[in-house]
Amino acid sequence: MFNEIDIDSIDLSLPAPEEEPNRQYYYMKLLKKLVKEKYYDKGKTPLVYNLVVGCQMNAKDSEKILGILLQCGFVETDAEDGADLVVYNTCTIRENANLKVYGRLGYLNSLKRVNPDMLIAMAGCMMQEKHVVDTIKKKYRFVDVVFGTHNIYKVAELLCERLTTGNMVIDILEDTKQIVENLPAQLKFPFKCGVNIMYGCNNFCTFCIVPYVRGREKSRNVDDIIKEIEMHVADGVVEVMLLGQNVNSYGNDLKENHISFADLIRRVNEIEGLKRIRFMTSHPKDLSDDLIQAMKECDKVCKYLHLPLQSGSSAMLKRMNRHYTKEQYLTLVDKLRAAMPDITLSTDIIVGFPGETEEDFLETMDVVEKVRYDSAFTFIYSKRTGTPAASFEDQVPMRIVKDRFDRLLNRIQTIAAEKTGVLVGRCEEVLVEELNDHIDGYVTGRLDNNTLVHFPGTADLIGKIVNVKLNEAKGFYYLGECVK
Ligand code: SAH
Ligand code: SF4
Ligand code: F3S
């Protein structure tokens, strides 16, 4: 894959090729040259700060952006202050994600006044919204480069354009059918990573902005996915998370080599050296019996499923365009537990969707009582411009929403704490992820079912799977000790 490509041998006296990814290799070489002249030749090391917010998709995109920039000579730093290039990979799923970005842009402006040479690149979901780009053009003229979700692979080309023309560069595509493969990525952890299996979303849940900012579903070719995972495994990765907004519809858009998501995980399960497989996100409407069977029979697939509920009221689910009822959702949970009695379940729930009555809310509480999730992410409904629900008339007053939100959170936390207790006394495999930042001499890792475990250990354990006796449950994590 990318490692096989030698960008230094590219001839910059020729015009840039049209086809991808060769065009990007050309611009990576050009940016490397510009970076050398601007920084290294003057005795400076160019620092890049990369802020990533939002979901796993954005985290993966940031790994790709950073991978390209490091190839071009930038070195990563963990602070905006002192950085030569700042990249914000934005999220717009809820309004507060969006507002935070404007706040931080104000801060960047103050840094740029001190260091006018600082480059600022804005990327990601928020940039796919026209009103955002218009605001940046009008009020944040100090931003250098703006690009969206469909062309992150072009970061080197866009920076070259900025450096050679001196103009603000804005490059936003509404959507694309193109998937550009074989570019570098800088993994956050050397032992686990996300792998995109598809991009975009076709579901148009009425509250959600994602289909507007990520375009239509595009599945990657199965051989490309397998090849990428094999390459990561050769580099030391033991856990992969297969990524898509709705992984259960993987492959539906592929004309050739069509395989289902269930068959894809069967293929991934055969990869030698890989230890754990996770995936995100599963839409309940497309969760097939075959997928449950595949999860059960594939030894590397973690017995953990994130199954967003959104609401327990069938009437709300209909207005949300989710295509399942409360009963269908509960039946799915029964099927999952019948096949895998120890499966851990997590979910996403929205409180205060337009028209939600107390009775609707109690339906959600009822599902929470019945399913007893191991963990749940709860959100206050946020109106997103351009989505159907934004124009629904019966928005719920914030006072009522907050009260419901608190009641829900309370129950979820109590149940989660009760559920975490069940493994106390057992010896389980833990993938060690990092040194514990609170207790000296401890490391932190995750069980197959995604629960955190802290136990005494040293840095050499990071990236390894070890057996840990779970001594004590503390709310949503365990304290344990390593056993040989
Ligand atoms: N594709 C995933 C969800 C991605 S967004 C799925 O279908 O499950 C992650 C979560 O953000 C959603 O599950 C939903 O609970 C929440 N969310 C999305 N839009 C929202 C909005 N407008 N207000 C509040 N929460 C929202
Ligand atoms: Fe949003 Fe629904 Fe698509 Fe998930 S499935 S990304 S919630 S539109
Ligand atoms: Fe946010 Fe975009 Fe993900 S809006 S949740 S970063 S797909």
Image (cartoon, helix red, strand yellow):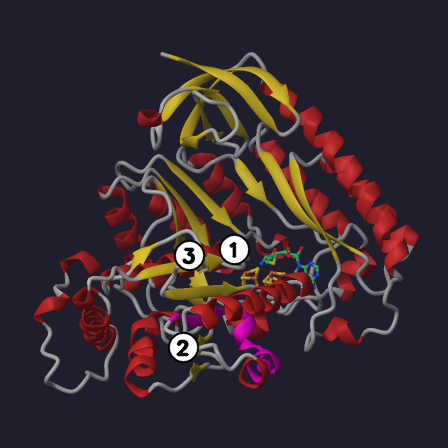
Q: Nearer the viewer, mark 1 or mark 2?
A: 2
Return the residue at label 2.
Answer: 177
Q: Is residue 164 above or below residue 315?
A: below
State yes or no: residue 130 in magenta: yes
In the rendered structure, which segment of residues is drawn in magenta? 118-135
Q: Position of residue 25 (x, y in %)?
A: 21, 71
Q: Of 167 and 461, which appears nearest the observer?
A: 167
The amino acid pointed to by label 1 is Asn
**Crowd tier of the residue under label 3, counting other residues whose Cα lies within 10 Å: few below 14, some 14–19, many 20 or above:** many
The amino acid pointed to by label 2 is Lys
From this viewpoint, is residue 157 visible?
Answer: yes
Return the residue at label 1.
Answer: 248
First in sequence, mark 3 or 1: give its number.
Answer: 3
Q: Residue 60, labelled with which disc?
A: 3
Residue behind label 1 places its C-beta within 8 angstroms of ligand 1: no
Residue 175 appears left or right of 193:
right
Asked if labels 2 and 3 touch by Cβ distance under 8 angstroms, the answer is no
Residue in the image at 36% along x and 43% along y: 189
Mark 3 → mark 2, Cα distance in angstroms: 19 Å
Q: Which SS class for mark 3?
A: helix
